[in-house]
Image (cartoon, rainbow, N blue to C red):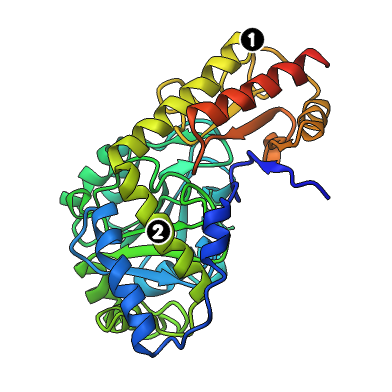
Amino acid sequence: MAHVKLHIPGPVEVSEKTLQAMTRPMIGHRGQGFKDLYAKIQPQLQTLLSTKQLVYLSTSSAWGVMEGALSNLVTKKVLNCMCGAFSDKWFDVSKKVGKEAEALQVPWGSPIRAEQIDAKLATGQFDALTLIHNETSTGTMSPLDEIAALKAKYPDVMFIVDAVSSMTAMPHRFDELGIDVLLAGTQKAFALPPGLAVFVASPAALAKAATVKTRGYYFDFVEFEKNAKESMTPSTPSIPHIHALSSKLDDFFAEGLEARYARHTKTNQMLRDWASKHGFTLFPEPGFESKTLVCLNNGAKPGGRVVDVAKLQKGMKDRGVLIDGGYGKIKGTTFRVSNMGDETEATIADLVAKLDESIAGL
Ligand SMILES: *Cc1c(COP(=O)(O)O)cnc(C)c1O
């Protein structure tokens, strides 16, 4: 069967080079070969995230670390900032791991603002918050800098941030932000296959985790730190993924991080231009649109064009491309197209031409 190219917001298309990197002969995870591999990528990851902390590799999807961060860091009550399907779910997960949790819910498509968080934290009830930087379900980006600045006012509150669909597409200066946990899964902007998560924790987060007896085993942050110091992971990792990550990091630095970020901005703008050319408005509140995907309003909000999304998807699939038909309660009344990962001006120009043809056929 012919491969249908992925332009859904995760998993995204994986290059032949990356797939090849995964086929290296197996090595033992306690041997020097593995330590050399992790030691080689550690400084690359630290540069990528602008941190002096050790960056951890978790053989799980992002949710593993998202759940693990709650187990490691919440002892009082967590504030779950909610503005879409993934961030809403984090509230359910907090309750499932037995944590006291409160929802800070804004309408889907709105960002989370610092003043809303400030008002909640001022009650003194919370020792942690969860935030999704780029809410992939709605294509909405919350202002992380503005929110992270609150950390100075609330040093004892653990700021847990999901950058799953923004990490590597724009800078995340972890030490400068001063937040406590930053995490991503690799099947989004990293353009690796699903199954690996990358994360970093602050010294304060590690100190807090060490005091929490029920922090679990598989996602024990203290174990991640202890092992990372020896260029190892707590349990047997997906070594093929780590070879692929190593290959990918070489690509990032060969291109240059700033060029990579600029490429994402440019390709995203091309998709926004396509939307406006065809009469679609974007679903997110203006000024808070994602740079790694577009979420087009298709009736979920007043104004703009409305089309048969299933037919549009079919037209694209016939042309060898998969786009997304909307997520959760805005399925069909929105649709999404991703520009994250390896996409270039040339590949997005090709995509746009196919979108033009498909929409003309509706
Ligand atoms: C995809 C995604 C997740 C979930 O990732 P899994 O790999 O399914 O665990 C979480 N948060 C955001 C923002 C995402 O885009």
In the rendered view, tell whether residue 337 sits above or below residue 278. Answer: below
At x 32% / y 35%, what residue is drawn? Answer: 259
- Residue 279, label in figure: 1
Provide the secondary structure element on which disc 1 rests. loop
> Residue sitting at 63 percent across and 38 percent down?
7
- Location of mark 2 (residue): 183
Asked whether residue 299 appears in the rendered view, the answer is: no
Q: Quadrant of the C terminus?
A: top right
Residue 261 seen: yes
Disc 1 residue type (three-letter): Gly
Q: Residues within 10 Å of mark 2 (few under 14, many from 20)?
A: many
Q: Residue at x 71, y 27 (%)?
A: 333
94 shown above or below 218: above
Q: Amino acid at mark 2?
A: Leu
Crowding at label 1, few (<14), some or many (≥20) Cα neighbours within 10 Å?
few
* Location of residue 135 in the rendering, given as x and y in whole percent from the top left corner: 50, 42
